[in-house]
């Protein structure tokens, strides 16, 4: 039980995928200008990530390892991710057109989100069991959502703050992201 | 067969990748058929939010082309007939920030206008018929034309082509077609809100007092609860409290006077309000205020009529209490 807590804590805070491992930075900067879209993107990413983690575990342990073709895992995991994203897109488009409209730009971002592929690859590299893989994915998605939503809320305030002219927009966002990243560095060594 | 393939890693790779592509492709194609989109495409949704005047003020030849243009990335604030309401609806649909109406495309007009042709001046040139985007003008060459009021969208496209300037834009009459309630008067709604606010203050005070008295009575109860040794004591205690309650006609009288004063106050304030309303809006009927005044009248009457009965009862009760010992003495 303690192991699982360690995995969760370390993926959420200590080895946060965005701020410490620098994975999934594209949606982190791109989709964080509005809190609502950040929340929906976090939800969609969590869903895709968890599905991918499960699929990739099954794929890896049932097909790649028995057939001794583990060198194919990167390309096959990408295939799985893209298919999952496409499935999600079709499903959302059918059932929630407004959400689809607001996620339209971000869904391809999830497909190319390095955090998703990173979780799948690291799971195989660290030889996690199924439960551990799922916890690892859960921690990664919670960490990603946490940082994304925090950052979006901060940027919403920044957009009305009195920022000096040359720092407006992307530059202040970069500075803020750097500061949050520094703050998360403070967690290193806890676990 | 399987052994041969698995020994040669090139073929194995090829077969695995191909089979996975086929599997995922199959799943996706099945799902895309299963969840086939039968709802309207976004152009239709946007078009349904536009006012359909087909006036072309947005620089596009109608509402549908403008909806298409919005989908392709045009600004959403180019529709003066729809006004800010349409812009808000579009912004919330597309989940983007709400811009103000772009004034270079026209100003928002509150009252709906329709075209009207002064028929004796019409020369029957049919130019306005060709200009009308919704076929709302009837007529033939060299004969008088007229506008079907219910079909006209008020786009003003027929005004410019008219060679004799016989077309006016008139506000729509509030007729049976498209009839709607009048907007509630601002003064009345403000009064209502003020009354409700005052009432809330009054209610909170009342609740506070009620709470306080409840708490006080509870405190008293806890201090007063004594152990009654027998049933007789309980009866005596109850009779004693009843006697003190009964034998205070002065208190009753004072309370009664207070009630009358309150009712009179209410009546006066209701009358004042009615006067003010009559001054502010002489045309109106002020049914509500009149009803409120009558209500206050009736309440005052009830309070007054309750007076003699209660007091009489009290007085007779007191008289009997006073007279009983005498009788016993005699």
Image (tube, rainbow, N blue to C red):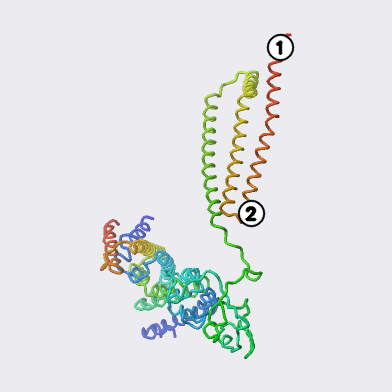
Q: Nearer the viewer, residue B268 or A91?
A: B268
Dot 2, crowdedness within 10 Å: few (<14), some or many (≥20)?
few
Which SS class for mark 2? loop
- Relative to B232, is B186 above or below? below
- Residue appearing at x 51%, y 75% in the figure: B46
Is any part of residue A54 visible from this angle? no
State the quadrant of the C terminus of chain B. Answer: top right
Q: Is residue A5 left or right of residue B70?
A: left
Which residue is found at the position 60% from the left and 18% from the top?
B229
Q: Quadrant of the N terminus of chain B?
A: bottom left
Label 1 marks a residue whose chain is B
Farthest residue in the top direction?
A: B330
Where does label 1 land, which residue?
B326
Residue B57 on image: x %, y %: 48, 79
Which sits in the foreground, B8 or B34?
A: B34
Residue indicated by mark 2: B285
- In the rendered image, residue A115, in percent from the top left (x then y), is placed at 35, 69
């Amino acid at each position: 039980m303690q192991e699982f807590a360690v995995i969760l804590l370390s993926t959420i805070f200590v080895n946060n995928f965005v701020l410490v491992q620098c994975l999934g930075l594209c949606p982190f900067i791109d989709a964080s200008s509005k809190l609502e879209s950040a929340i929906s993107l976090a939800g969609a990413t969590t869903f895709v990530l968890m599905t991918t983690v499960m699929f990739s575990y099954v794929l890896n342990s049932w097909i790649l390892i028995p057939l001794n073709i583990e060198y194919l895992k990167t390309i096959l995991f990408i295939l799985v991710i893209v298919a999952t994203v496409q499935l999600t897109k079709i499903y959302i488009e059918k059932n929630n057109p407004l959400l689809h409209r607001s996620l339209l730009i971000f869904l391809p971002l999830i497909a190319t989100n390095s955090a998703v592929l990173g979780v799948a690859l690291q799971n195989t590299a660290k030889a996690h069991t199924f439960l551990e893989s799922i916890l690892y994915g859960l921690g990664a998605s919670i960490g990603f959502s946490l940082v994304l939503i925090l950052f979006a809320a901060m940027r919403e305030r920044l957009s009305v703050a009195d920022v000096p002219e040359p720092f407006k927009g992307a530059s202040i966002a970069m500075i803020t992201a750097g500061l949050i990243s520094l703050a998360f560095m403070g967690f290193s060594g806890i676990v | 067969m399987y052994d041969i393939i698995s020994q040669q890693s090139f073929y194995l790779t090829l077969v695995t990748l191909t089979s996975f592509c086929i599997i995922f492709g199959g799943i996706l194609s099945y799902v895309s058929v299963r969840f086939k989109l039968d709802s309207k495409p976004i152009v239709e949704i946007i078009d349904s939010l536009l006012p359909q005047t087909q006036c072309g003020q947005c620089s596009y030849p109608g509402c549908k082309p403008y909806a298409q243009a919005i989908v392709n990335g045009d600004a959403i604030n180019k529709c003066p007939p729809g006004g800010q309401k349409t812009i808000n609806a579009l912004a919330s649909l597309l989940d983007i920030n709400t811009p103000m109406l772009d004034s270079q495309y026209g100003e928002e007009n509150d009252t709906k206008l329709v075209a009207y042709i002064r028929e004796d001046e019409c020369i029957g040139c049919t130019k306005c018929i060709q200009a009308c985007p919704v076929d709302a003008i009837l007529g033939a060459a060299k004969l008088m034309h007229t506008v079907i009021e219910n079909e006209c969208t008020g786009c003003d496209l027929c005004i410019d082509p008219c060679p004799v300037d016989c077309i006016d834009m008139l506000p729509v009459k509030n007729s049976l077609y498209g009839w709607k309630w009048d907007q509630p008067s601002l003064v009345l709604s403000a009064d209502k809100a003020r009354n409700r606010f005052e009432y809330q203050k009054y209610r909170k005070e009342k609740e506070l007092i009620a709470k306080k008295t409840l708490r006080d009575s509870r405190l008293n109860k806890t201090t007063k609860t004594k152990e009654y040794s027998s049933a007789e004591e309980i009866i005596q205690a109850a009779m004693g409290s009843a006697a003190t309650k009964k034998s205070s006609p002065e208190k009753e009288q004072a309370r009664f006077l207070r009630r009358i004063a309150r009712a009179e106050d209410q009546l006066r304030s209701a009358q004042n309000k009615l006067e003010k309303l009559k001054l502010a809006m002489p045309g109106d009927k002020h049914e509500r205020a009149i009803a409120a005044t009558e209500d206050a009248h009736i309440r005052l009457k009830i309070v007054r009529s309750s007076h003699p009965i209660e007091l009489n009862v009290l007085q007779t009760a007191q008289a009997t209490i006073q007279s009983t010992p005498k009788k016993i003495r005699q």
